[in-house]
Amino acid sequence: MAWPNSYDTFSSPGTTLDSPPHSTLHTELSTRLAVIQQTLGLTPQGAAATVDARLDAVEVAASGSGQWTDYNAEVANVSTGVGSVTARYRRLQQYTAAVRLHFAFGAGSAITGTVTAKVPFAPKSGAIHTGQWVAVRFGTFPRCGAVYVTDDRVINFAWEAGSGVWTAAGPTNATTGDAMIVSIIYELASAL
């Protein structure tokens, strides 16, 4: 049996079961149901709970995007105090990921040295992987800078210290209410 090239027209039962014959209605329906089963297979939902859930997953994969997922960024030289650091990544394409870090500073927070963090997956060796960071409420004005990823997965921060001078040593006066957001998109060494 083949999948039809056009929509089927099923006979409507009349007021009696002989016009069209009752058996004809059963044959038409069972033939089309057999075609559907043969086309979709015995487990059309695959590993998903429903066919709808499976199609949603296929749509997300086809678009190249995934959901944001938390990971341990192994942040160094940041004491969060009562604040927090949230690290998330998202697959953009087979070999590309986006990473976001959010530092929320609270009482006892401090930047104690050169800030580093890690991306969740190895970057493509030799490629240039850059992004940016923005710090809000550090002193009287927002601060910003660049980040770059090295082959060992380390996110390195570059700070604009004033007068166009860039340095790896950043501000150390994090206080309650300060925040820093890092955003980077990078090429992966292998597919996600």
Image: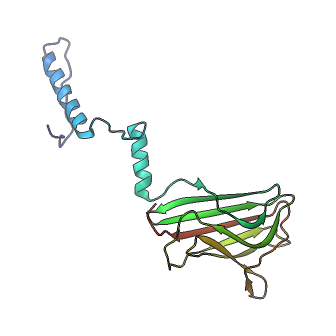
- The image quarter containing residue 172 is bottom right
Residue positioned 54% across, 64% down in the render: 121
**Where on the picture, by quarter, is residue 86?**
bottom right
The N terminus - image quarter: top left
Residue 20 seen by the camera: no
Left-right relation of 70 to 103? left
Q: Residue 148's x, y, as percent? A: 61, 76
* Position of 176 relative to 22 (above/below): below
| Nearest to the observer: residue 152 or residue 36 | 152
Q: Please state the horizontal and vertical placement of residue 152, each as a whole percent of the image.
A: 57, 72
Q: Can you give x and y, in whole percent of width and height, for residue 23 in the image?
A: 14, 18
- Total of numbered circles in the picture? 0
Which residue occupies 20% across, 31% down? 34
The type of colouring in the image is rainbow
Return the residue nearer the eye: 172 or 134: 172
- Percent from the top left, x then y, of residue 109? 83, 62
